[in-house]
Image (tube, grey):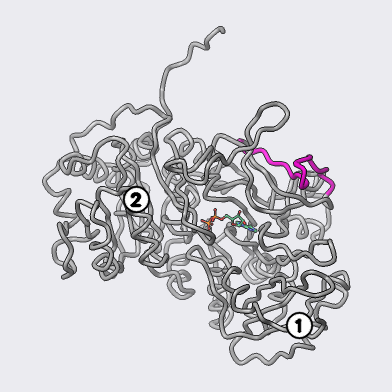
Amino acid sequence: MLRGIMMDQQLLVSSLIVHAARAHGDTEIVSRTVEGGMHRYTYADAELRSRRLAQALAKLGVGEGERVGTLAWNGYRHFEIYYAVSGSGAVVHTVNPRLFPEQIAWIINHADDQYVFFDLTFAALVEGLAAHCKGVKGWVAMTDRAHMPSIKVPNLLCYEELIEPHKGDYAWPELDEWSAAGLCYTSGTTGNPKGVLYSHRSTVLHAYNASLPDSLNCSAATTILPVVPMFHVNAWGIPYLAPMNGAKLVFPGAGLDGKSLHELFEGEKVTTTAGVPTVWLGLLNYLRDNKLKLSTLKTAIVGGSACPPSMIADFEKEHGVDCVHAWGMTEMSPLGTLARIKGKHLASTHDERFALRCKTGRIIYGVDMKIVDGEGRELPHDGKAFGDLLVRGYCVTAGYFRGEGGNVLEKDEHGRNWFRTGDVATIDPDGYMQITDRSKDVIKSGGEWISSIDLENIAVSHPAVAEAAVIGIAHPKWDERPLLIVVKKPDATLTREELLKFYEGKIAKWWMPDDVAFVDQLPHTATGKLLKTKLRTDFKGHKLPTA
Ligand code: ADP
């Protein structure tokens, strides 16, 4: 091999904040705090405080590769923890506080977190957890002395007191880029959650990929507000890609309701945001009810669950916002595809472009994907054939923490590894992928598959429907038939017949749901996805009128 003669510089998480402090030192990070009020400072301030926290972690004895947990909203202290922990060679483990306490305790113990940092919102939760997490050496309240919670927890520490004695005379260590930087657990709707362990290398490369014009399109002129929590796959990489590009960062704290978000979007002149569909539903409804507009927002990235076409249309029509449908997984760091148009589509009609933007999107550089049939044979990219979706790439996991879940990789005929996503999808000739279902959620009717996502999207485009889920119900003749479960908008009237009529002409006849059930609310996972396992249990004995 003739080796290239380039400098040997490892791709390290710390380099992102160091770069931001040097090149964008006065660019702001604005946070809505849990204590109340707003906090503002700069990348230069954040980098210094991260170094001070790194010194505090060293003093606590946190060693290389050891895990440090967080139970926290999006805010400046959480951001400092990201850099102090990973930058110093330890592993930041963001725990989703919306999980059940038993699951949280299980995850903290499985990860063997040495310390856990928490926002005041979660003080009571921590008090309950402490007795079940004996391995945790200390619990750090992310606040100052004046706001310390009065809870009974062994070795309760105060964040500001912890960093206070340190001056920041600390040099970020030159780590190996393959060393672990972050740990996220999948939401574990089936079985125990599994840990995905990101490296410095994958984190930095993902930040590049996610910044690109056809990804989040982030620059030093961007003001970005991650609505997606920092405990949900690292807020899709935003805490890393914002400093990489010198974008102004706006952290919403615990205020994810329509009113709080609108205030922050307008007050801070946010241009780009990202989050799951349920949050945007809340925001769009709030704006409509209060006759408000989004005047600075240009782009809303929507993923985590299928983005209904009606949401893309509403964002565009009501606010002039480009709503970009995206897809990914914890196992993919997470970004995989985004539904942005290509140059050749500029000549297409608005409706043609709209249809493309409703798809789940094209792969970004660094990710490859294919669909296969039951025998593992690759299926054509004709937009019709659907099969199991497999991915590969340098930001895709090669296994789970502590070897859980066994070997997750499959080799192709060239000996290359692929990861099975568990999603079922089509891919069209232009490379636009469309997820039709989770493989465990597809409805198998008479040997053919019905897409629950397509049926749900139609339901939520009805003006009287707030939310909808479709599941398969056992049927004596067809194996399974679709049941539509609907939450009506407050004060809306809607009958079963009216809703089924709404489907006519929009789908093949045999896709028509066999029944409609109206409910007050639908169950969700800790990351805002429909919890279909629960729905299947709840409606197990449901008698379809066609059965
Ligand atoms: P999360 O932390 O978001 O729950 P997971 O890794 O558990 O991440 O979930 C990833 C799964 O979420 C995907 O495999 C897919 O089933 C679903 N998903 C994410 N984005 C979309 C999307 N745009 N459309 C349909 N499903 C999606």
Rendered location of residue 228, percent (x, y)? 48, 59
Residue at left 74%, top 70%? 455
Q: Secondary structure at mark 1?
A: loop
Q: Is residue 105 left or right of residue 197?
A: left
Instruction: Name the quarter where the N terminus is drawn.
Output: top right
Question: Image height check: is 105 above or below 220?
Answer: below
Task: Tell me the amino acid under the disc marked 1.
Answer: Leu
Rendered location of residue 251, percent (x, y)? 39, 59
Q: Which mark is residue 335?
A: none
Please give the residue where the numbered disc 1 appears in the rendered image. 544
Question: Is the stretch drawn in magenta largely helix, strand or loop?
Answer: loop
Q: Is residue 223 left or right of residue 477?
A: left
Q: Nearer the viewer, residue 69 or 326?
A: 69
Magenta residue span = 366-382
- Front disc: 1 or 2: 1
Tags 1 and 2 touching, CB below 8 Å? no
Residue at left 76%, top 60%? 354
Q: Is residue 287 visible?
A: yes
